[in-house]
Structure formats: structure tokens, C-alpha cells
Image (cartoon, rainbow, N blue to C red):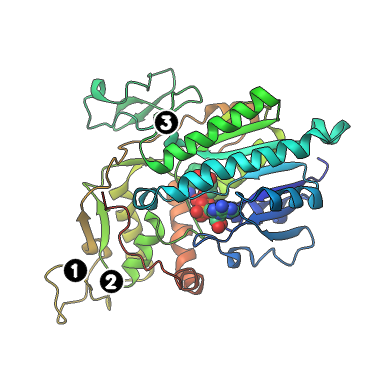
Amino acid sequence: MASKKVLVTGGAGFIGSAVIRHLIDDTDHSVVNVDKLTYAGNLESLNSVSDNPRYAFEQVDICNGVELKRVFAEYQPDVVMHLAAESHVDRSIDGPGEFIQTNIVGTYTLLEQARTYWIQLEGDKKASFRFHHISTDEVYGDLPHPEDDILSANPAVIPTEAEGSLAGKNLPLFTEKTAYAPSSPYSASKAGSDHLVRAWQRTYGLPTLVTNCSNNYGPYHFPEKLVPLMILNALEGKPLPVYGKGNQIRDWLYVEDHARALVLVATQGKVGETYNIGGHNEKQNIEVVKTICDILDELVPPQNVIPSEVEGSSNGAKPINSYQELVTYVSDRPGHDMRYAIDASKIQRELGWTPQETFESGIRKTVQWYLDNQAWCQHVQDGSYQRQRLGSKQ
Ligand SMILES: NC(=O)c1ccc[n+]([C@@H]2O[C@H](COP(=O)([O-])OP(=O)(O)OC[C@H]3O[C@@H](n4cnc5c(N)ncnc54)[C@H](O)[C@@H]3O)[C@@H](O)[C@H]2O)c1
């Protein structure tokens, strides 16, 4: 395939940086990374590729149309991969304004600049231009949970031929046809942005694609999210806060598998289509936390870890025998969705994508990565975020 110039928004974030490392390391495409560098953006995640002549960085807010216009004119991209977003549900509960601004107004601004640029292109350059919007499965709301009375669950979810099997029960999965029913300010703002992208395709003919993906995990994940939070807290003997009963189910996908899927869709997907991306790995949050504890018990046995901040503990607290002793159940997140699970058969059938990692192999790699990259963890937390609880205000 001819090499393309890819404009990636949000490339200093968790998934965006994985996409850029994949584009630079495994393809001939070149990249311009457009990122505002919020608390979640970290250029250190791109150290391995930042000297490559096929990589460029522009610190730009996607809400700034003038700057975006300059970037389009200067770099003449063939493909836009739009990942920039405010992405943390708990933060969206404390402060939804930033989510509306970046996820909705920012996406609108980017769409308009992409359209203005695309309209004046000619020939092959115009015909092959693509705008790929990266979204989440959270736009669909939640699915019936194995512990539910199925009839009382989200009525927008119609059980289809795509049924997942969990604990012996056949429960529905999200397909590309599932109706939107977002629950949080985050997922509602992403749903809004998905609708804008599809409207720009239908109304203006902008060649767009949308992907909706399940929960990602892997290296370079900001420590406010479940997996890195648990690893880093455990190593310091801090409580491992599990929301509610910890029985919320997510479908976990290793971030590098997601990055491969995204580049495939951006370069080979069919214009106007939506592709769901998932890992076929439904796990309850508590299972994820216990798995992390088991791997840590094996890799860094906790002989010298003394629990801190655990209720009832004193300075004379004894070292723990297993990191699982640090699990602490806390009040649930308001509006917390109980189950997400993806039917990824379309992308498999039409583009030949399947995940390469199992949950077991991916989570082991992830734990090892955090053990080997403590400096990165330290640097990204040098700002205001200190792993405090977010999103519990109402
Ligand atoms: N993390 C997941 O599990 C997951 C799953 C499915 C979909 N997604 C979607 O994938 C995308 C990337 O998610 P992530 O987990 O990498 O997010 P992230 O929070 O790690 O990174 C977001 C990046 O966007 C940048 N950004 C934020 N506001 C910006 C603005 N106004 N202008 C320019 N840049 C801005 C940040 O600096 C950061 O680098 C998001 O759109 C998210 O909705 C994430």
C-alpha cells in the first residue's frame, strides 16, 4: 500500500500513542500528532518514535479552528484518525463542561476543518481521503448482566444472533446496530460526537468511518484508570478501591490489538461504515483486580509491603501475604453501567482483524511494563493527579 500521511489527534494519550508507535514502527505511513497535552497527554509515551523523520508534533487544541486550518494546509493529510477526547468517566461526573467542549465542540471544529480541506482536494487525493472517528462501546449504555432479571435491563438492547456466553448464559452483545443509550456525561458526549461524524458523511459526503471499542488496557495508561491504578497502589501498599461489589463486566482489549484494528479500519474500512472492536474477554472488575494481585504476588512477592491508609491499620501493621488483602470496596460510581460486551464479528469478517493477545497474556505484559517503567508513572503523576478518588460528588 502507498504510504499515507496520517493526522492523529490525541496522539500523546494512551491509545493515540499506541497508534502512532504502530504506524511508525510497523508501516511506511507518516504521522502528524495534534494534541493539546492535557493532564492525560504525555510526549514521553512517544520517545521511541519522536526522532523518526516520519513523525511530527503540533501542540494544538482541536477546538481551535484557525490552528487546525493551518495544520491541514501545512501537512496535507490523507487520513485523519480522531482520538483526542476527555476520556475518564469519573472526571466527567465532577466536571462535564470540558467533555462537552472537547468531545462535541472539538469534534465539530475538526469535522469542519477536515471538510473545508477535503472539498478543495482533487483526483485520487480527494477520493482516498478518510476521516476515522474513534469512539467507545459506552455509547450503547449497558447490557443485561448474568445476575440480572434480563427483562428489566436496557430495552434498547435487542438480543440478536450475536449472543455472548457468560457463566453459561446466553446474553446479548453490542452490535453495530445497537441503539445508543449513553449513561454518563462522558459517554453522552462521545455519542454526540459519533452522531456529528455520521451527519457530516450523510449531509456533506465527507468520507468518514466510526469505530466503537471496548475497554483498553496496556502500557502507557494514565494511572487514574482501573488497571494501572491497581498495580501502582498495590506496589505502595495502598488500598485497591473496587467500586460497589466489583461485579461490573467489561470486555477487555489489549491496546496494541486496538491500534492494529484502527489502522486497518482507517486504511481499508468501507466509507460510511461502523466497526465494533472488542477483545472477547468479558471480566468482572473484581476478577481483573484479583488477577493483577496474583501476577504481582508472583513477580514481586509482598513480604515487605505494609498496608497504608487501610482502615484500622496502625504504624505497627504487619506486612501482607498477598496483594488481594489490599482490596477495599468503596461506594459505587453514580450511574455505573453493569455490563459491556462487544460483538466484533464484522471487523473480523470484513477486514480480517482478530486480537492477538488473550487477557491472560496481555495483563501479564501490562503488569511487567508498569514494573519496568516506574519513571514514566512518576512523571505523569507529577501534576495535580495523585490517584485520589474522582467522580463521587453528586
Ligand atoms: N481508553 C479506553 O478504554 C477507550 C475505549 C474505547 C474508546 N476510547 C476512545 O479512544 C480515544 C482515546 O482514548 P485514550 O484512552 O487514549 O484517552 P486519553 O485520555 O489517554 O488521551 C486523550 C488525548 O487527547 C488529548 N486531548 C484532550 N483534549 C484535547 C483537545 N481539546 N485538543 C487536542 N487534544 C486533546 C489529551 O492531551 C490526550 O493526549 C478517546 O476518544 C476515547 O473516547 C477509549
Quarter of the rendering occupied by the N terminus: top right
Question: Is the residue indicated by label 2 positioned so its CB lies within 8 Å of ligand 1?
Answer: no
Element under disc 3: helix
Image side of residue 114 versus residue 310, left or right: right
Q: Nearer the viewer, residue 335 or 224?
A: 335
Residue mark closest to the camera, 2 vs 3: 3
Q: Earlier in the sequence, mark 2 or mark 3?
A: 3
Q: On the rendered structure, is 129 left or right of 194?
A: right
Which percent across, then down, holds residue 387? Answer: 35, 65
In the image, is the residue at mark 1 within 8 Å of ligand 1 by its beta carbon?
Answer: no
Q: Amino acid at mark 2?
A: Gly
Q: Amino acid at mark 3?
A: Tyr
| Residue displayed at 51% across by 47% down | 101
Which of the numbered marks, if any, corresponds to residue 237?
A: 2
Can see residue 45?
A: yes
Point out the frontmost of discs 1 and 2.
Answer: 1
Q: Quadrant of residue 334?
A: top left
Judge the density around disc 3: few (<14), some (14-19), many (≥20) Cα neighbours within 10 Å. Answer: many
Residue at the bottom extreme, as displayed? 316
Q: CA distance from mark 2 to mark 3?
A: 36 Å
Residue identifier under label 3: 140
Q: Residue furthest front?
A: 66
Question: How far is mark 1 from mark 3, CA to CA?
Answer: 37 Å
- In the rendered image, residue 352, in percent from the top left (x then y), is placed at 63, 32
Indicate the secondary structure of the residue bearing disc 1.
loop
Which residue corresponds to the image point at 29% horizontal and 40% vertical from the top-left? 335
Residue that mark 1 sits on:
310
Which of discs 1 and 3 lies nearer the camera? The answer is 3
- Residue type at mark 1: give it: Val
Image quadrant where residue 111 sits:
top right
